[in-house]
Image (cartoon, rainbow, N blue to C red):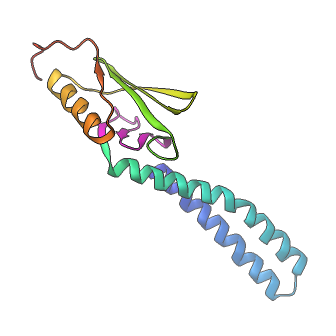
Amino acid sequence: MKAIKTRRDKLICLFMAGIFVAAWFALVNEAKVAFGIGLTSMVLLPWLLLENRRLRAARLIWENRILTVAGEKGATETVVSTFGALVGSRVYKWGWGGVALLTVELDKERICLAYGEGEKISRLELAHGISNIQLAMEVKQKFWYETGVSAVLHGWQENTPPN
């Protein structure tokens, strides 16, 4: 989420700098230069709005997390929530706009999430770091409570000792 916020903040700075420079050129009666710089700054606006939407989605995912997997040294953190998944600065969304979480499968190493709308279905596979059946059952319960989707557990033994 930090990378998304940083990118959005840099775009805001570039956009505002361009507007201020264009205003300055307008004040010194350089209308053509002011127009060119202002137009160039306006090209950044759609990109800025897209990054702002991505940041809002990332915050929503972060605030409603079901499963968090800390990355290894230097690796990115992964968050799975009611509304999507956040993998580093990549946002996967479901739970809004008609896109629904369809299935959740949990084996001993990975969690597989299927989401989509109609015939357009995507799958996301992530390492989860869950070490025992009790934690897997807690994650299964959270998914059921938060999304209404019953997670399927594969390869977990009831007599697996907790770590």
In the image, residue 56 lies at what x, y percent?
47, 56
Quadrant housing residue 151: top left
Q: Nearer the viewer, residue 8 or 92?
A: 92
Tell me what residue is drawn at x 75 percent, y 81 percent.
Answer: 23
Tell me what residue is drawn at x 35 percent, y 41 percent.
Answer: 81
In the image, 10: left or right of 140? right
Tell me what residue is drawn at x 29 percent, y 41 percent.
Answer: 146
In the image, residue 42 lies at what x, y percent?
74, 66
Q: Residue furthest front?
A: 118
Tell me what residue is drawn at x 60 percent, y 54 percent.
Answer: 50
Residue 111 visible in the shown view = yes
Q: Is residue 147 magenta?
A: no
Q: Nearer the viewer, residue 36 or 54?
A: 54
Quadrant housing residue 72: top left
Where is the C terminus found, in terms of image quarters? top left
Residue 57 against residue 87 in the figure, above or below: below
Total numbered circles? 0
Residue 1 visible in the shown view = no
In the image, 46: left or right of 51? right
In the image, residue 114 lies at what x, y percent?
45, 27
Q: Nearer the viewer, residue 15 or 125?
A: 125
Quadrant housing residue 158: top left
Q: Is residue 71 magenta?
A: yes
In the image, 53: left or right of 62? right
Q: Which residues are magenta?
A: 66-91
Residue 48 against residue 19 in the figure, above or below: above
In the image, 12: left or right of 45? left
Residue 8 against residue 152 in the figure, above or below: below
In the image, residue 150 lies at what x, y percent?
30, 28
